[in-house]
Structure formats: structure tokens, C-alpha cells
């Protein structure tokens, strides 16, 4: 699989009477793009708004941030499978991306109706809270969208995410026929045999257990979010968006998956530091020991059959999902695959252990610090001048921590941070030490 | 004048003898003795071992109070700048004695340091209040152990704050805190992977700790006479959650009476727990608190009684420290209630 | 003297690794003491077997973290199976 990824940097975004990219400026034909969004009869209201780096603006609720990518040569479409998009295998040919732009999906639709998982992320474009995430360096084209409330949960999720993808497709299409100023080729070509062979075990939350449905929305593999056995993806497939969609933290967005620095480095240093074998995507939140261990065994077996000498493991969830993840680390080590685990940590009060299950094989852990913003000591985000999205936000007694008695405060702030920080892919340098 | 150091040793390292002399009384001698000569060498010109305190390991533990009184007297008389205890390597009794001597010295305002192997049983109980450096398992590691102890000890004696254990080369207190490692996590992970693959040394950022082991309670003699209590972390609440149990991050537990109940009905009970799909338990709450089965067994005479109180909380996102508190509270109530055995259902 | 506790959990290995001494294998996180997909009679028999296994664990001396599997053979399992036979 050979993929040429062409990057079109975006330094300025303006609404205009056409959608066009030229010399770093993206013009967006607001009316035409909104017409395409409203074409979906499930959409009741839709607006487009802009947020620039450094602006005093807050966006809430943020369900996803998507980097516009489009296939200009080769099979399939970017972000395949999800929201009914074609499922043709991607990863070959040429793909264009708008670098420095994110399409933000802003909607009050919750992940599912079964309780326990709530949309929590808001994003600032300036200030100390903003600095914790990569998004404040992007121009955000915000799709503020609401679906017909009478629809079922899955349909509402599908409708608003599809709206965001419609906008993403529309602006990415502006690069068709143009020559990308920056081009990079991704290919896992032959390398020096002496280099160690490395695989990336990418653990992704499935909402199936918590929602009671195999079709609930979340980070998806070719559109599927259900609990499935481990799945091999060529890294180019991920660059073309085969793994896409969001989960509950600011670091679990389509944007961070496509721009996962760990994944990109694995790709870029192929042939120099290792032979990169590719990605094994492992779904988490199986609900018996039996299933959790089975998935771990099979993921490790797949890594072994691929010839892995080494493995990196990441995950994007919490709680009992740690079990299948740490047992995957263990299973790999037991097969002689040298494994490193990149993870956040739980509360350490009174010297408590910060990992759920202490398995001795997990002897190489890189920590991205406490996942809980409260434990991290993250202060309130300061007030902002402008809000995109809902003018009020529930805090304190929210449904997860309290009794349903929401306290509504102005989104313009000050606002406490969301519950979780959780730097799944190691974008930042925050860690823990003892 | 250099730093005045007092050295604490057991009977073996103090040159008295082996295990047969473990009952040796506390003695004080001038200057370095036995292994203390290596300590003096490690100190070089920076300090002087002015005295050595030696006590048999068994004597220390069988007569702790008097030994500590004696040590206190010596330390107050000698007024050292630094107390060095051991190193004890893997020896448990010796390690424990060293830790207690260090604590005593600190209570007298004297900087103190010891050296123990990470698996020395004394580490768990004293890591929070005694500065220790990690050593090898055997005295073969003596030169390195003493070098570390001197380096760290002199820092303490100078009143310098020690950095995190990982950087300072000490045994950690077990308390983790936020720390900026200045290199993005993904880069550190790939570097660690290459080190691991190429057999180069690396330091894990999260040492795995072995959980506390609790001795099992003895088995019930006779189930037929036993009162059985139930506890659930499945977040069981009365329908509508009138008590306002939280869905996660519990800071209290809830006690309910089941005295009048034969089973839990979905009409009267439900689950409120943010960590699993609650709907199945909402229809049949006995899945997380098996009251119906216990009542049947009570009726059949297979158990004595179902305890009238049950305990519930949502077991999700609970910091371990809070879990310890809540568990203790529930256990005390069950004990006061005369319960013989407990079923704990976890989701 | 402590009170023995039988911990019933579907993710029993975690309970064992973290030091619970008497651990009973439950069905699934969402329905620990039984399985609604079996139909009412078999669901009840399964739940009773789990509870009987747990009580058997309370009555058994253990040296450290021990798994009692209602679906396996052995003393505790057999007690559970016995119960299931009487129930159905």
C-alpha cells in the first residue's frame, strides 16, 4: 500500500461566496455548505461558525474534531464506513488534507441514552486550559447542529456526525485538482533485516457494553463500534480515516486519531529505527474475564504471527477496560514480544497504586499523568468573550456524579475543566513521578 | 571539620558474630567498626564516623523499648550530624531495625539514611517516613550501597530537599505526583521501546506495586447456623434513588433493611452506577444482590439467617484511599451486627 | 478474628490479583448472579449455583487468593451443581 498525503496548510478561514483554498486561505461558501448539511431531513438546525487560534472563544459541547481529508486518487473515501459511507478499503493512492483546520462537531446529542457516558468536552482557543490540547493551534470550523429530537439515539448520533463529515468533505473538496505544497509518501517498504519489527496495539473503547447496543456511536473501525476480535489495519488505512469518530475525552477525537504522533512516528521511522508492521485494533469493554483474556491472547497471537519483536500499546478508556489492555501487554511479553505501555494514571491518594491491575510483565510503562483533571489540579478555565454552541453548561450535580440536579452556569465561564484529561497518544509531556 | 557521622550496625556487620549473637546487647564504640570502615572510606574527607552503635537483630525486636531508649541516650550524647543505618540489603529484621533507628534519629533532629533491597519487608511500612536507598540483595553490593547512602545522607545533612525518588536514586515514598518530563509521551514511549528491544537499561515511569495481602479469615464452621450479610458495589438503590446515591466516585455507602423482603423487585429497586449497563439489573436487582436465593436457602435451613441490613454503593472511579475507608466502615457495621459471613457482589 | 467474604465477580482475575481471598466467578458484569438469556428456570438454577458456591467458599479454609468456579468441577463446583440439580 502506497499513500501520498498532500498537505494544504490553512492559516486563515473566511466565509465567502465560494469554497476555495489558495495560498493558505480557506474560503468557505457558508450557504452552500449549510444547504448540503440541511439536505439531511433529520437535521433541524445547523449553523457554521469560526474560531481562530488565540481568540477568546469557547466551544461547547464538542463531540468531535475532524481534519478534512479527501481521496483524490485510489479506492474509497476518507473516513470510510461511518455514517453509511462506502466501506471500500482505503490507504492507497493520493489523499489531500487541510492541515491546521479542524471541523468541530457541536451538538447537544449525547453518545447514547443508557446512562454513564456523557459529552463533557469544551474547547478554548486561548488561555491555560486551551494550552493543554492541540486544538487551539487550529482554525476550527464549527458545525453547530441539532437533529430531530424525536429520532432514536443512534439516528441522532448518526445525523450530527454525518453533518460534520459533510462539512469536512465540502471544504476538503476545495483541494481537488490542486498541487499540494507539502507532500509525504507513506509506504512500509523493505528495510534492513537487522531492524527490530514493531507493531502498534491500538485499544479502542466499544460502547456496546455501556449502551446495550452494537450500533452506538463511538470511535469506529470502518464504521463499526461493536465488540469485535482484534483487527489488523495497515497504517495508511488510518491515515485515510479507517479509524475515526470520537469518544469521551478531548484526546479521543477523529483529529487526534488521524494525527496520532505515536502512530506517525512509527510510520516515519520505518526503515530507520524499526520495521513497522502496522496496527492491531483491539476493542475494549468485554464484560467477562473469559472474553477479556481471549482478546488479549488473540491480539498477542496476531502480533506474533506478523513477526513482531516489539509492541506499543495504547488505550482510550478507563475502568475495567484496563484489564484486557494490561493482559494484552502480558500476553505479548509472554510470547517474547518486548512491550511498552503508554497510559494515564488513576488517583494516588495515600500512596495508592495508580494502575488497576498490577501484572509484573508490565515493566515498561510511560505515564501521561493522572487522567482526572481534579487530581491533576487543573484550575477553572477563565471567562471568555464569545461562546460557540450552548450558552449554558451543567456542572456539579451532573448526571454522572450527582443526583440529576444540574447546576447550570454560563458557558462563557469561568468553568471547571471536564472530568478527564487523559492524553491517550502522548501528545504532551505531563507525567507522574514518585 | 567534616560531618560527624554515627553508624548503626547489627551483630554481623558490627563484627560480633553471626546468628548465634543476634541477642547481643546494644553497645557503642568509638570510630568505625566492621563494615563501618567501608563507610569511612566512602565518606572520604567529607565526614568522620565518630561512633558505631551495634545491636543484635533479635535483641532489637525483643527489647525494642529499652534498645530505643539506649540509642536515644547515645545519640543525644554524641550529637552527630548524620545517622547512617545499615545497609541491611534483604535482611528483614535488620532492615526493620535500621528503619526504626532512622526514625528515632529524625525525631531528635538528626538527618538519617538507610539502605535496603526493594523487596526487604521493612520497605513497605517505612518508605513514607524513612529515607532509604535501594541496594542489591547481598553484601556484595556494599560499596555501591554505601556510596549512595553517603551521597543522599550528606544532602539530607546539608538540609537540601531531595527530588523525586526516581531522579534522586532513593526508594520512593510510594506517593506519586504530577511531573513534567519535558519530552512528549509518545517520544518517551518509542525511546523506551528501542531501549527494551536493544537490551539497554530503561526506567519504567510507573513501578508496579504488589498489592497488600490480607490473611484470609477462617472458614465458617457451620453454614446452617450462620448469619450471612450482603454487600454490593453494583450501585443498588431504591427506585427513584430517594437517598441520592451518586453514580460514581462514592464518598459514602448506603445501608438498607431487607428484613421484610423475600426478594428484590424491579418495581422497588434499581441500579444507579455509571460504569455498566444498568437495564438488566433494573429488571431483576437480585443479579447484584442475591436476596431471593439466600431467602430460599434460609427457608431450607442451609443457612441460619439473612442479615437484616445490606450495603450498597456504586463501585466506579473510587480512589483506593476512599475504598479503604468505605470498606472499613461496612466491615465494622457487619461485625457489630453479628454477621458470620459475607457475600460481596461486584460489577 | 475476621469475617470471611466471598466476592462474586465476572472479572474474577482482577479480584485475585488484587488480593481478595475467596473469589467466586460471576456470570457477566451486567448480570452477576445469573443469566437472563437462559430463560427463567435455568437462570434461577445458575444463580443458585453461584450463591451456593459462594457459601461453600465461606465454609472452606483458604491459604490465599482462591477461585471458586461454579461452572467447574471440584468441591465448590460440585456443591453448586448439586444445588442446580435440586433446583431444576
Image (tube, coloured by chain):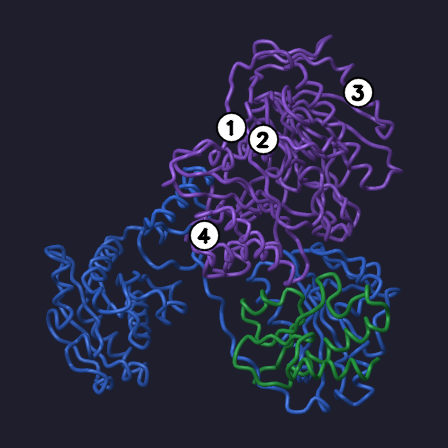
Chain colours: A purple, B blue, C green
Instruction: Give the x, y percent position of residue A73.
Output: 63, 20
Q: Is residue C61 above or below residue B46?
A: below
The reply to the same-chain question for discs 2 and 3 is yes
Q: Gap in Å between the C-alphas at discs 3 and 1?
A: 32 Å
Identify the mark nearer the N-term, 1 or 4. 1
Camera-nearest label, 3 or 1: 1
Q: Chain of mark 4?
A: A
The reply to the same-chain question for discs 2 and 1 is yes
Camera-nearest label, 3 or 4: 4
Q: Chain of mark 3?
A: A
Q: Quadrant of residue A224?
A: top right
Q: Which residue is mark 1?
A: A186
Badge 2 element: helix
Cβ–Cβ under 8 Å for marks 2 and 1: yes
Identify the mark nearer the N-term, 2 or 3. 3
Q: Quadrant of the C terminus of chain B?
A: bottom right
Q: Which residue is mark 3?
A: A36
* Residue closest to the eye, B121 or A169: A169
In this rendering, would B113 be left or right of C28? Answer: left
In this rendering, would A321 be left or right of B17? Answer: right
Q: Which residue is mark 2?
A: A239
Q: Is residue B174 above or below residue C53?
A: above
In this rendering, would A65 be left or right of B209? Answer: right
Q: Gap in Å between the C-alphas at discs 1 and 4?
A: 25 Å
Q: Residues within 10 Å of mark 4 (few under 14, many from 20)?
A: many
Q: Quadrant of residue A29?
A: top right
Camera-nearest label, 2 or 1: 1
Instruction: Give the x, y percent position of residue A356.
Output: 55, 58
Amino acid at each position: 500500500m502506497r499513500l501520498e498525503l498532500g498537505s494544504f496548510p490553512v492559516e486563515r478561514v473566511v466565509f465567502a461566496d465560494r469554497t476555495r483554498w489558495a495560498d493558505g486561505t480557506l474560503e468557505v461558501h457558508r450557504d452552500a455548505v449549510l444547504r448540503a448539511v440541511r439536505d439531511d431531513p433529520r437535521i433541524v438546525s445547523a449553523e457554521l461558525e469560526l474560531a481562530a487560534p488565540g481568540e477568546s472563544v469557547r466551544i461547547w459541547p464538542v463531540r468531535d474534531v475532524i481534519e478534512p481529508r479527501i481521496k483524490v486518487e485510489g479506492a474509497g473515501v476518507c473516513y470510510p464506513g461511518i455514517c453509511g459511507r462506502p466501506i471500500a478499503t482505503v490507504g492507497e493512492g493520493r489523499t489531500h488534507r487541510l492541515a491546521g483546520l479542524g471541523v468541530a462537531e457541536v451538538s447537544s446529542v449525547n453518545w447514547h441514552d443508557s446512562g454513564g457516558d456523557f459529552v463533557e468536552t469544551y474547547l478554548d482557543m486561548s488561555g491555560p486550559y486551551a494550552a493543554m490540547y492541540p486544538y487551539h493551534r487550529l482554525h476550527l470550523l464549527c458545525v453547530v447542529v441539532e437533529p430531530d429530537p424525536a429520532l432514536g439515539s443512534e439516528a441522532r448520533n448518526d445525523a450530527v456526525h454525518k453533518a460534520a463529515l459533510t462539512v469536512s468533505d465540502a471544504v476538503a473538496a476545495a483541494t481537488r485538482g490542486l498541487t499540494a505544497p507539502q507532500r509525504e509518501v507513506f509506504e512500509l517498504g523493505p528495510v534492513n533485516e537487522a531492524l527490530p519489527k514493531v507493531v502498534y496495539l491500538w485499544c479502542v473503547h466499544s460502547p456496546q457494553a455501556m449502551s446495550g447496543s452494537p450500533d452506538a456511536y463511538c470511535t469506529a473501525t470502518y464504521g463499526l463500534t461493536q465488540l469485535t476480535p482484534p483487527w489488523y489495519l495497515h497504517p495508511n488505512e488510518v491515515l485515510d480515516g479507517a479509524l475515526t469518530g470520537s469518544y469521551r475525552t478531548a484526546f479521543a477525537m477523529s483529529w487526534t486519531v488521524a494525527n496520532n504522533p505515536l502512530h506517525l512516528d512509527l510510520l516515519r521511522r520505518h526503515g530507520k529505527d524499526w520495521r513497522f508492521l502496522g496496527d492491531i485494533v483491539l476493542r475494549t469493554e468485554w464484560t467477562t474475564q473469559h472474553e477479556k483474556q481471549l482478546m488479549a491472547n488473540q491480539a498477542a497471537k496476531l502480533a506474533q504471527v506478523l513477526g513482531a519483536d516489539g509492541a506499543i500499546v495504547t488505550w482510550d478508556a478507563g475502568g475495567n477496560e484496563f484489564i484486557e489492555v494490561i493482559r494484552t501487554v502480558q500476553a505479548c511479553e509472554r510470547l517474547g514480544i518486548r512491550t511498552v505501555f503508554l497510559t494515564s494514571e488513576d488517583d494516588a491518594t495515600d500512596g495508592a497504586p495508580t494502575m488497576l491491575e498490577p501484572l509484573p510483565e508490565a515493566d515498561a510503562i510511560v505515564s501521561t499523568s493522572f487522567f482526572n483533571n481534579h487530581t491533576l489540579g487543573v484550575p477553572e478555565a477563565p471567562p471568555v468573550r464569545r461562546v460557540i454552541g450552548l450558552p449554558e453548561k451543567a456542572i456539579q450535580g451532573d448526571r454522572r456524579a450527582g443526583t440529576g440536579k444540574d447546576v447550570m452556569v454560563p458557558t462563557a465561564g469561568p468553568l471547571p475543566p471536564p472530568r478527564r484529561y487523559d492524553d491517550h497518544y502522548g501528545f504532551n509531556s505531563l507525567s507522574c513521578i514518585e | 571539620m567534616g560531618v560527624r557521622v554515627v553508624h548503626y550496625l547489627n551483630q554481623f556487620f558490627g563484627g560480633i558474630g553471626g546468628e548465634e549473637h543476634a541477642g547481643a546487647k546494644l553497645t557503642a564504640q568509638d570510630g568505625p567498626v566492621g563494615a563501618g570502615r567501608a563507610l569511612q572510606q566512602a565518606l572520604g574527607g567529607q565526614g568522620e564516623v565518630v561512633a558505631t552503635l551495634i545491636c543484635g537483630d533479635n535483641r532489637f525486636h525483643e527489647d525494642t523499648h529499652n534498645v530505643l531508649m539506649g540509642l536515644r541516650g547515645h545519640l543525644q550524647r554524641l550529637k552527630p550530624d548524620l545517622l547512617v543505618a545499615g545497609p541491611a540489603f534483604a535482611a528483614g529484621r535488620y532492615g526493620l531495625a535500621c528503619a526504626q533507628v532512622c526514625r528515632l534519629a529524625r525525631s531528635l533532629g538528626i538527618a538519617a539514611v538507610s539502605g535496603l533491597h526493594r523487596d526487604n519487608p521493612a520497605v513497605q511500612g517505612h518508605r513514607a517516613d524513612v529515607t532509604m536507598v535501594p541496594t542489591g540483595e547481598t553484601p556484595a553490593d556494599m560499596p555501591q550501597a554505601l556510596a549512595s547512602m553517603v551521597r543522599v545522607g550528606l544532602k539530607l545533612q546539608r538540609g537540601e530537599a531531595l527530588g523525586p525518588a526516581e531522579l534522586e536514586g532513593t526508594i520512593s515514598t510510594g506517593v506519586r505526583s504530577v511531573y513534567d518530563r519535558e519530552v512528549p509521551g509518545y517520544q518517551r514511549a518509542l525511546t523506551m521501546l528501542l531501549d527494551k528491544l536493544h537490551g539497554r537499561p530503561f526506567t519504567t515511569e510507573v513501578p508496579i506495586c504488589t498489592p497488600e495481602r490480607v490473611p484470609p479469615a477462617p472458614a465458617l464452621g457451620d453454614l446452617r447456623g450462620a448469619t450471612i450479610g450482603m454487600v454490593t458495589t453494583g450501585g443498588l438503590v431504591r427506585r427513584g434513588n430517594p437517598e441520592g446515591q451518586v453514580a460514581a466516585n462514592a464518598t459514602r455507602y448506603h445501608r438498607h433493611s431487607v428484613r421484610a423482603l423475600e426478594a428484590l423487585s424491579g418495581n422497588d429497586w434499581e441500579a444507579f452506577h455509571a460504569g455498566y449497563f444498568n437495564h438488566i439489573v433494573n429488571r431483576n436487582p437480585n443479579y447484584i444482590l442475591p436476596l431471593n436465593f439466600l431467602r430460599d436457602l434460609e427457608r431450607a435451613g442451609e443457612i441460619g439467617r439473612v442479615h437484616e441490613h445490606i450495603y450498597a454503593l456504586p463501585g466506579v472511579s473510587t480512589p483506593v484511599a476512599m475504598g479503604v475507608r468505605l470498606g472499613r466502615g461496612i466491615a465494622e457495621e457487619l461485625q457489630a451486627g453479628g454477621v458470620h459471613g459475607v457475600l460481596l457482589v461486584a460489577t | 478474628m475476621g469475617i470471611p467474604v466471598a466476592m462474586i465477580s465476572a472479572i474474577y482475575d482482577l479480584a485475585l490479583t488484587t488480593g481478595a481471598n475467596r473469589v467466586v466467578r460471576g456470570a457477566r458484569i451486567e448480570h452477576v448472579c445469573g443469566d437472563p438469556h437462559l430463560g427463567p428456570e435455568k437462570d434461577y438454577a445458575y444463580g443458585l449455583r453461584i450463591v451456593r458456591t459462594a457459601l461453600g467458599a465461606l465454609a472452606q479454609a483458604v491459604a490465599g487468593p482462591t477461585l471458586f468456579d461454579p461452572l467447574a468441577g471440584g468441591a465448590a463446583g460440585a456443591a453448586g451443581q448439586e444445588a442446580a440439580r435440586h433446583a431444576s
